[in-house]
Image (spheres, rainbow, N blue to C red):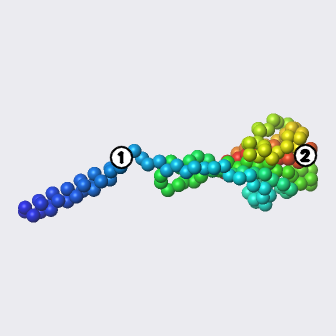
């Protein structure tokens, strides 16, 4: 009987020590912060047309894709949202077809982010941005607008994915 009692007391003591050891180092959760530098400005047109086939044919592109947020959980990472921003030049034929296919509304476009604006000469656009919700939905799935400056065939959009 005494042996069983001693074994039980020993097991409780070991359990208490293990539980106490788990708290060593403080009780505050450890933050794992990843420094995220901005992604470079990319010019690969194939990546844009592959990701957004509804946009149609383009002849040039400047785009960025940045992960949003910083992982401070210190756990297995979950899904990450990405902000995709692009300024593209549509081909002549694509711009002509889009202009004829949809009814466009003049609308002020938000200014491109500073990394894209650096390479975008304001003289390249007439500042007459047009948008169409049906076209934007086909390209971006309804999450944002695509703005097109038809005289220069320049399109601008930003979306989360």
- Residue drawn at point x = 85 percent, y = 51 percent: 89
Point out the image quarter for the N terminus: bottom left
- Residue drawn at point x = 78 percent, y = 56 percent: 43
Q: Residue 75 location in percent, x, y?
A: 47, 54
Mark 1 surroundings: few (<14), some (14-19) or many (≥20) residues within 10 A: few
Q: Residue 105 location in percent, x, y?
A: 85, 38
Q: Which mark is residue 159?
A: none
Q: Which structural element holds mark 1?
A: loop
Q: CA distance from mark 2 to mark 1?
A: 61 Å
Tell me whether circle 2 and circle 1 mark residues in contact (CB < 8 Å): no
Q: Nearer the viewer, residue 94 or 123?
A: 123
100 left or right of 37 in image: right
Mark 2 surroundings: few (<14), some (14-19) or many (≥20) residues within 10 A: some
Q: Which mark is residue 152?
A: 2
One can see residue 24 in this view:
yes
Q: Which structural element holds mark 2?
A: loop
**Residue position marked by numbered label 1 in the rendering:** 26
Decide: is 111 above or below 20: above
One can see residue 134 in this view:
no
Q: Residue 104 location in percent, x, y?
A: 86, 41
Say how many tags the image has.
2
Which is more N-terminal, label 1 or label 2?
1
- Residue drawn at point x = 87 percent, y = 38 percent: 128
């Amino acid at each position: 009987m005494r042996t069983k009692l001693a074994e039980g007391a020993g097991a409780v003591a070991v359990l208490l020590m293990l539980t106490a050891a788990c708290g060593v180092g403080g009780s505050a959760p450890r933050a794992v912060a990843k420094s995220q530098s901005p992604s470079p400005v990319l010019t690969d047109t194939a990546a844009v047309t592959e990701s957004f086939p509804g946009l149609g044919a383009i002849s040039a592109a400047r785009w960025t894709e940045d992960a949003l947020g910083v992982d401070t959980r210190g756990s297995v990472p979950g899904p990450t949202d990405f902000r995709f921003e692009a300024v593209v030049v549509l081909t002549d034929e694509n711009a002509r077809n889009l202009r004829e296919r949809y009814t466009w509304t003049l609308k002020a476009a938000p200014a491109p982010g500073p990394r894209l604006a650096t390479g975008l000469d304001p003289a390249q656009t007439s500042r007459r941005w047009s948008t169409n919700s049906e076209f934007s939905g086909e390209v971006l799935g309804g999450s944002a607008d695509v703005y097109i400056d038809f005289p220069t065939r320049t399109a601008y959009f930003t979306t989360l994915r």
